[in-house]
Amino acid sequence: MSLPFTNAHIHIFNSDCAPDRFLRILPVPLVRRAPGIIKGIIDSKIGRGIIHGMFKAWYGKASDKRGEVDKYVAFLDAGTDATQLEVFQTALAAGKTFDPAIRIVGLTLNMDHMDSQPSKRQISFITQLDEIKDIKRYYPTNFFPFLGIDPRQAGGLDLVKWAKPYFESGVATNEGKVFPYFSGIKLYPALGFFPFDPRLEELYRYAEENHLPVMTHCTRVGSQYIGDQIESLIPDQPAMIDMAGNPAIATAKTSIEKRIKDYKDPSRQWIKNSKIGDNDLACDLFGHPENYIPILEKFPNLRLCLAHMGGSNEVIKSIDSKSKLDQIRKVDQLSWFEHIQNMMRKYPNLYTDVSYTLSDFYDTNGKVFTSTFAFLNTPVDPADPTKGKFGDRVLFGTDFFMTEQERREPELYATTKANLSTWWDILGRVNTQKYLMQPI
């Protein structure tokens, strides 16, 4: 039996799942000062039209800021007027035009802790998961959701006890196959936690023992902690998963603590409580690739994917003074993409994916595509051909519906198939099966 094609990275949560001040993720001061009001307006189609007009008048037709907001409003169209089921069905329809047996990994996000202020209109994470389980019952062979995890919810064995029922119960098909409700773990550290948090250690152990893959967000942009207490989340020396006498963890710990010190430097003030949730640079600390070294050292058989290859800006190591990337480069001399490559050389169970990054294949004069293609074809170890190429551990994913602000879902499939034709089946069939280890 041939392997089904798999999109290993999409989101189907809708506006109901997000906190009231969710729009603080937008790097626009006006939005961050009144995120709840603007979210309320955006929740209707008429309101979204008003927002478009308002920013056109406020920033001007050619403004980069207005364009930024326009893109986010376009992506919110996908998640505001639809249920989670309808969002999934849209993604499924796009995928089925390329493989009728398409498998789609839906990544849930626990957004209950991403704000320091309680939300009145947000559904709980448990409600989000109950809706996901219903979708799994409808589409047991097409839908493979991952369980969003946040150590602020619970820790240690209590977290494992909470998570187990999602992985150890499921749906039986007419053919007698049983598919668990959830097929892996999703982390989104930029929401306000470090992935090496000791409260996650028992869950990683459970995942390794039960062959559950882990997918984690790994770019400098995206959703993030939007509260006004960022300083309390980033101590000078955060607690860390550790192994006595392990030099790799000791080196990573030293590097992580130095990075925190550099970010806290009074001349930069990148970690500072903000009344409008201006936490963009501070939240980079949570998702840095080096944060996963303690996990990979302690759990060498855990299959972990650092998504997005670090992000397009990191793939081409761009310098952008508007987003302070030029200043960041003085602190982090290696790009996140370079960190990921170095780590993939050392850790054979470490993966990455092309999600969202593939939407930028033809921006910046094709540099993102050229760099990605070269990466796929580069030997992990030129002296040892048995270790294969980096492309043997890269997954296909689109990051729907986040990418709706850039390109439509069918276009992302078609562009990848046309331009990475030699890698199409490897990324979407062979590699995703190795990573998921799901019955066919």
Image (cartoon, rainbow, N blue to C red):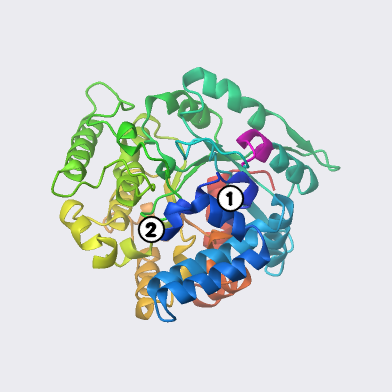
Q: Report helix, strand or loop for mark 2.
A: helix
Image x and y of residue 5, in percent: 63, 60
- Check residue 297 for magenta coloring: no
**Residue at 66% across / 26% down in the picture?**
165
Label 2 – label 1 distance at C-alpha: 43 Å
From the viewer's perspective, tell me whether residue 59 is left or right of residue 96. Answer: left
**Residue at 44% across / 68% down in the picture?**
68
**Residue at 34% across / 27% down in the picture?**
241
Relative height, residue 36 to residue 230 (above, below): below
Q: What secondary structure predominates along the stretch shown in magenta?
A: helix
Q: Residue 162 carries which label?
A: none
**Residue at 54% across / 23% down in the picture?**
160
Image x and y of residue 88, in percent: 69, 55
For residue 360, say whether it is visible: no
| Image quarter of residue 40 | bottom right
Image x and y of residue 274, in percent: 33, 44
Relative height, residue 278 to residue 255 (above, below): below
Front disc: 2 or 1? 2
Type of amino acid under label 1:
Gln
Q: Mark 2 points at which residue?
A: 29
Q: Nearer the viewer, residue 56 or 14?
A: 56
Which class describes the residues within 10 Å of circle 1: few (<14), some (14-19), or many (20+)? many
Relative height, residue 25 to residue 408 (above, below): above
Q: Give the range drawn in magenta.
A: 122-129
Q: Name the residue under label 1.
A: 433
Q: Which of 374 and 316 is in front in this view?
A: 316
Which class describes the residues within 10 Å of circle 2: few (<14), some (14-19), or many (20+)? few
Type of amino acid under label 2:
Pro
From the viewer's perspective, tell me whether residue 364 is left or right of residue 152. Answer: left
